[in-house]
Each structure stands twice: as C-alpha cells, then as structure tokens.
Image: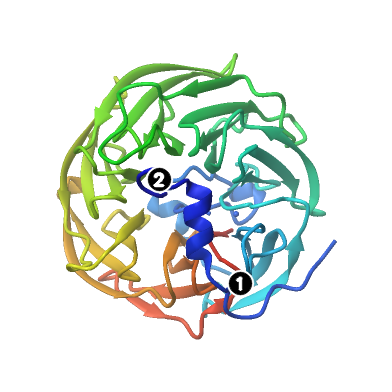
Amino acid sequence: MGTGGLSRRRFVGALAGTAAGAALPAVTGCDGTPAPSDPSAARASTPGTRPSPQAGSRAPSGPRRLYIGTYTSVDGGGEGIGVAAYDPVTGRITGAGTIKGVPDPSYLAVHPDGRTLYAVSERDDGAVTAVRLADRKVLGSRSTGGAAPCHLSVHPSGRWLLSANYGTGSVAVHPIEASGALGERTDLVTHSSPPPGPDQDGPHAHQILTSPDGRHVLAVDLGTDTVYTYRLDTDAGKLTEVSRARAAPGAGPRQLTFHPGGRYAYLANEVDDTVAVCTYDPATGRLAIGRGQDTGSGSGTNYPAQVVVAPDGRHAWLANRGHDSLARYAVQEDGARLRLLGTVPAGGDFPRQIALSPDGALLFAANQKSGTLAVFRVGSADGGLRLAGEPFGSPVAVCALPL
C-alpha cells in the first residue's frame, strides 16, 4: 500500500504504532477466501477464489486452526507467524504459539492439501517461506527477486507459488516440491508499462491470484492502475501476458476478489477510496473494470483494503482503513451489481485484511494499528455482522488465515 514516493515499508512502519493486547506465547495463513480445514477438504488458498456453497456447508466441529501474519521489524511487532485456534461456533480465539524464523510474514496462504503454509517476507530483499504445519518446521525460503513482497497465493494445481513484489512492481513464480518446500524461482515479470499513475513513483504489484476457472493468473498493480492477466505455463512455470485492464487514473487498485459465479469480480481501489465491479471473460482472460462506487466511508480519509464474498455469493464485505469499518453490500444480478447496505465498526484500528471461515459463518478482521483480531458472526440471511466477543490481541495483526 502507500502512495507517492513513500515506500511501502516506511508507510507501514509509520502506521504500525504500538500493538495492543498480549503477544502470543513463543514456541520454538490471510486471505480473503475460505481455506482448507483439513487435507481431505482442502482447496487452494487463492485470494478472490470462492468455493461452492456446498463446500462450506458442513457443520463445524471442534477448534479450528488460525494463523496470523505480522511485521517483525516494526515497534511492537510480532516474533513470527502467530498460531492460534478458534471456536467455529462462538468465534473465540485462543493463542497457541509463534512460528519463529520467518521475518515480516505479512501475508499467508496454505497449500491445497492443507499441509504447508507459505508466507512472504516483506523486506527489501523479498522472500517467500514454506512451513510444514504438522510440526511447524520451516522448510526454507526463496528470493522473490524483488522488494517488499506483500501478497502470495498457491495455484490450484498445488505445483506453483505466485507472489507480488510491491516495492519493485514485479510478480514471481516458484515451483512447489512434493514435500511442500519451494524450488528456485522460474519466472519474474516486472510491470514496466504503462507508466505510473498520478503521484506514483513506479509500479507496485499488490496482488497475484488465479481466476476461478484456473485458466489465468491476474496481477493487480497499484502503481500503474492496471490489472494484468497472464497465462501460466504449468509445466515450465512461466507467465505470458494476454491482456491488461486499466482502472481510473489514480484509483490505486489493491486487491481483486472473484464472485463464486466466476464472471464478475470486485476491485478495492486504495487511493481514490472506491470499489469497482469488474467483468471477466474466462475464454480470453480479459477483465473490464467498472466505475468506482461508494465505500461508505463518508468524507474522511480512507484506504479500502480488501473485499470478501460470501460462499453463496449473496453478500460482500469491504475493509475500510481510516474509516475503520466493514462495509456490507448486497450482491445482485448474479454478481454484476453491488448495493451498499451500510457499515459497522471494524472492532479495531486500521483493518488491513479480512477473511471468512471455511463455512462462511465467521468473518475475521486483522486490525493493524490496534494489534487486534476482531471476529464477527455473519448473518446467513442478510449478511449482517455481529461482533463475537472481545477482539483478540496480536502484535501488529495484518493477516488472518482461518482453516
């Protein structure tokens, strides 16, 4: 995130403040989509890709795992990847330790088989790291070939890890070995055109995800106001650009989330404080970005972070940083239209990321500046959000990955 010449790391450091709440006890995933709760029901943790309603309909039973991303190099930051458990009925979170040895793990994703966790290290010498979940063993790290990687996702095949380097405006591909560990990078593509948007100092890749049909990979670049569509060679791990979609000049697109129908997606525009409905053509990979719509933030300063969509596709929610709220939308016309229903407080300060539990019954908000995770029960009929108890304290919470 960040605008103008201010680097992402400096901007994040300035915003971090002092984390509230108790740190997780030391022991030697973040995404807006439901992640696997066990290997037999696993799905790729690809932000924006939604499971079918049936996939999330099984009754929850017993505590579920929760992983928390943070920054380790800012005042009040964490010591690694936070490990916790949550009650799928009440939403209550219980701390269960920290996976150390992963610096600045600001974004998390899980392998489709549910056995390996992946994290970015959002630093000048950017890296991605694999962690075996059975024993929390760090399997090693690989360079992303760029600075400040802020997002990653696993290709649905489970064979490739995709990452976005914010600082240098590039996207990278790494092979995933049978053990879950990462191989040497197979591709690195820098967004050299179009020129940066208003008040931007260069390209700033903010997200990379696979389309629901699995045919294309899309990269959202805040600096160039562009969403790039690529085709991934699943044998060689190479990206080939097939189209570009331009957002409004100065929109600052941050993250894209697909409707479960696969024909529409929703783009959170960080800089001009809007959300846009996009149409997607699975045959060509072409995306068309609609006009910016109201985020419910009023006239104050606000940086929209991310949209998540209910598994049944009837409602969507947007995290508003600055307004510190969660906007609720009715999804209409099979995904073609968003209608703002209102906002609720985010349960903390600066909601950097939001995620749904696999069954869609709970929404987690990672509140960066207050150092808290707020959990909301989701109304099945109207998509209303009701805070489920007191927020959970976690240092500089910037990503929640509920399994």
Left/right placement of residue 320 relative to residue 149 reads: left
Dot 1 falls on a residue whose secondary structure is: loop
The correct choice, above or below, for 91 with respect to 7 in the image is below
Where residue 233 appears, as percent x and y from the top left, is 52, 16
- The image quadrant that residue 294 belongs to is bottom left
The correct choice, above or below, for 216 with respect to 382 in the image is above
- For label 2, count other residues whose C-alpha is less than 10 Å away and answer few (under 14), some (14-19) or many (20+): many
Where residue 44 appears, as percent x and y from the top left, is 54, 42
According to the picture, the residue beneath numbered tag 1 turns out to be 394
According to the picture, the residue beneath numbered tag 2 turns out to be 48
Q: In the rendered image, which quarter contains the C terminus?
A: bottom right
- Which numbered disc, 1 or 2, marks the residue that appears first in the sequence? 2
- For label 1, count other residues whose C-alpha is less than 10 Å away and answer few (under 14), some (14-19) or many (20+): many
Left/right placement of residue 4 relative to residue 44 reads: left
Q: Residue at left 41%, top 32%?
A: 219
- The image quadrant that residue 382 belongs to is bottom left
Dot 2 falls on a residue whose secondary structure is: loop
Q: Which mark is residue 372?
A: none
> How far, Cα to Cα, is label 1 from label 2?
25 Å
Task: Check disc 2 and give the amino acid type.
Answer: Gly
- The image quadrant that residue 199 belongs to is top left
The correct choice, above or below, for 334 with respect to 76 in the image is above
Task: Check disc 1 and give the amino acid type.
Answer: Ser
Q: Residue at left 29%, top 24%?
A: 244
